[in-house]
Image (spheres, helix red, strand yellow):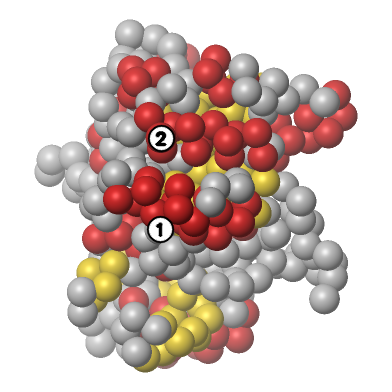
Amino acid sequence: MSKEVLEGVKILDLSAVIAGPSSTAFLAEFGADVIRVENPSGKDIGRTTPMVDGVGLGAKTLNRNKRCMALDLHKEEAQKIVHKLVKWADVVVVNFRPNALKKFHIDYDDLIAINPQLVYVHFSAYGRTGPYRDKPGYARVAEAFSGLTYITGEKDGPPMLTGSWIVDGLGGIYTAYSIMLALYHKERTGEGQLVDLGLYEPLFRILDELPMVYSASGYVKGRFGNMHAFLVPNNIYKCKDGNWMVMPLNGQMFDRALRAMHREDLMEDERFQTNEARVANRELVDSLIADWVASFNREELDAILNEYEIAHGPVNSAKDICEDEHILARGSVIRVYDEDLGREILEPGVVPKLSKTPGRRKWSGRHLGADNESIIVDMLGYTKDEFDALKEKGVW
């Protein structure tokens, strides 16, 4: 097997919830040696959500390919163990508020005194600076704060949150990206550094149109349901059989759709000729597409749209995803045997696919504290008696 691209990179993951742990899981899939430290209570969301037959499935992927420890950071002895691991690590990831970092003696200044070349990643709700730096926050708070919630929902309805932890997922990707940037700098210069990231910031960065359009024109983007504010037609349409199809008919795709509908006559209609004209006639244009789609079952519509090379896609349920031939062929989901459930389940595959140094799933997330003894005794050099005494004392 080819050498893993991140082989030799050592990461100490002290983060909780989803965004931080997902970032290090992404890197562990490509060979990084990640030690995840969790609160021994087992109440972290990855251990409790989603729950199936008493098994928390979130930790299966959040802790994929990681060594798993449990330590109570309120205990001085646990902090000492962490400090020993900091000497080993190239990267430390935390997502506590600044006051908690100081209380646990794991803030940036604490740890670079132990390892001056450390890459220290602090991923918190609002970042380390600014008036909100000490406020608590989770993904849903960040989603609303970023502006996404305000523009999500029906035109005359209330703001709506998305149906998943999209903020955590995007935050995890940005955190992994930040780690790689800092490691690249360290490779060139030998210098570690502090990486400071607010949970709302990755989402805010890709919503770049909001501040730019407002500052340039005073326009406050509102809610358009499933429509797009600036591109028409661009919506989800209901088929005759009750299934749904998403169709972003921008530019040449709209012309292709008119040909598929045998409505080439509308190409000469000023109301349909440009995107600006279609935006001005949004309801007319959208109803034209909706009425046409409603006359076909989804399979029939899919065949027509494929024939005319029109961008489209089904609105998939979890069942659809798990049965889709393309998803299965690509390995976007992989079948694994889960010992806790005693049956096979599907887990997400590894992303992205590298031709020379592919990532892989070696194991799903282990039980809480599964690697405590091997790390504390075999790696850090504590005796078995010392290990047992720490356990008896409630350090984990």
* Horizontal side, residue 334 vs residue 238: left or right: right
- Depth order, front residue of 326/72: 72
Tell which residue pokes out farthest to the left in this image: 157
Q: Does any portion of residue 196 appear in the rendered image? A: yes
SS class of the residue under badge 1?
loop
N-terminal of the two: label 2 or label 1? 2
Question: In the picture shown, does residue 181 fall above or below 290?
Answer: above
Looking at numbered disc 2 in the image, what kind of residue is underneath it?
Glu
Question: In the picture shown, does residue 285 fall above or below 239?
Answer: above
- Depth order, front residue of 371/381: 381
What residue is shown at x 82% (from left), y 76% (from top)? 1
- Residue 377, given in percent of the width and then of the height, sits at 55, 54
The reply to whether dot 2 and dot 1 touch (C-beta < 8 Å) is no
Residue located beneath label 2 in the image: 77
SS class of the residue under badge 2?
helix
What residue is shown at x 67% (from left), y 25% (from top)? 115
Residue located beneath label 1 in the image: 369
Looking at numbered disc 1 in the image, what kind of residue is underneath it?
Gly
